[in-house]
Image (cartoon, rainbow, N blue to C red):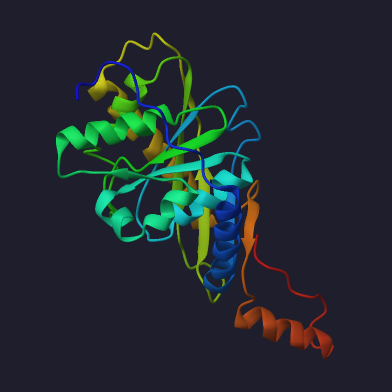
Amino acid sequence: MSDRGALPVPPPPPRPQAARGFAWYLDRIARRTFATVRWYHAPDAAPPDRPVLVIANHTNWWDGFLSHQVSRAMGRHFRILMEAEHLARYPAFRMIGSLPMERRSRTQAMRDLAVATACLAPDALVWIYPQGRRTPAATPIQHLEQGAAWMLLRHEGPLRVLPVAFRYPFTSEQLPEACIRLGTPWDVEAEHGLDRAGITARMATMLTETIALLDRDIAIEDFTGYDTLVTGRDSINLKLDRFRHRLGLLDQAPERNG
């Protein structure tokens, strides 16, 4: 298959009942895993009249699952490219929006990217991890794969590219936090004058800047402007301080950090 020509018919959108059930399940296990799941986003991050291609860093097993919750919180269908061999093992993920990405065959990879491109519609968020695989959090964003750039070039019409950063730090709580920051988008019009290499370089810069902002917020534990996506369990220190407050040994009832 070439990188030109008509796009295929996109697969059906995620099944509503499956998406609701999966979201409920993810919230349940996230509450047991994290002190808090926080996210920072602009109100107009996903405008209603423009498809959105989300590019995100990939460091953790949780990334794809929290991508699902972010999509639902933004009122969009969830679409995500997933390794074909893993999706073959867990085909139920197709019902909630997963799309296969075959990396062992260039021809099939292009077919899979074409299907994902066909899913770019104003009612969906299409997620792709340009690093191509889980990468240690400290690894700089570099040597990105060009699949996202290929999708941008194949898509006809306006498109928003939205960078998203994930981090999972231990801060002041017993359990880790999950922190998500949506970065500054790139609204791509028909004439952008860039080739695949230029687009990929711009995407790398967008991701690097978004991750840097999230790392800054985590370093100083300043989560002003972040909303709570999932409220987790109380840590031991909070439980003890609340007990001390009930005994009159602490003047003010403690609250979660941030």
Q: In screen coordinates, is 121 left or right of 108?
A: right
Does residue 158 sit above or below 106 in this rendering?
above
Dividing the picture into quadrants, the one containing residue 188 is top left
Q: Position of residue 93 (x, y in %)?
A: 42, 54
Dividing the picture into quadrants, the one containing residue 20 is bottom right
Give the residue drawn at x 63%, y 81%.
237
Does residue 131 sit above or below 169 in this rendering?
above
For the question of whether residue 52 can be seen, the reply is yes
Seen as rendered, the residue at the extreme bottom is 247
Give the residue drawn at x 23%, y 31%.
110
For the question of whether residue 222 can be seen, the reply is no
Q: Position of residue 81 (x, y in %)?
A: 36, 43
Please tell me which residue lies in front, 154 or 176.
154
Does residue 214 sit above or below 158 in this rendering?
below
Q: In screen coordinates, is 209 left or right of 193?
A: right
Give the residue drawn at x 79%, y 83%.
250
Please tell me which residue lies in front, 109 or 192.
109
Dividing the picture into quadrants, the one containing residue 55 is top left
Please tell me which residue lies in front, 172 or 110.
110
Q: Position of residue 19 (x, y in %)?
A: 56, 52
Q: In screen coordinates, is 245 left or right of 214?
A: right
Q: Position of residue 223 (x, y in %)?
A: 61, 53
Give the quadrant of the N terminus. Answer: top left
Give the quadrant of the C terminus. Answer: bottom right
Q: In screen coordinates, is 213 left or right of 208?
A: right
Count of marks overlaid on the render = 0
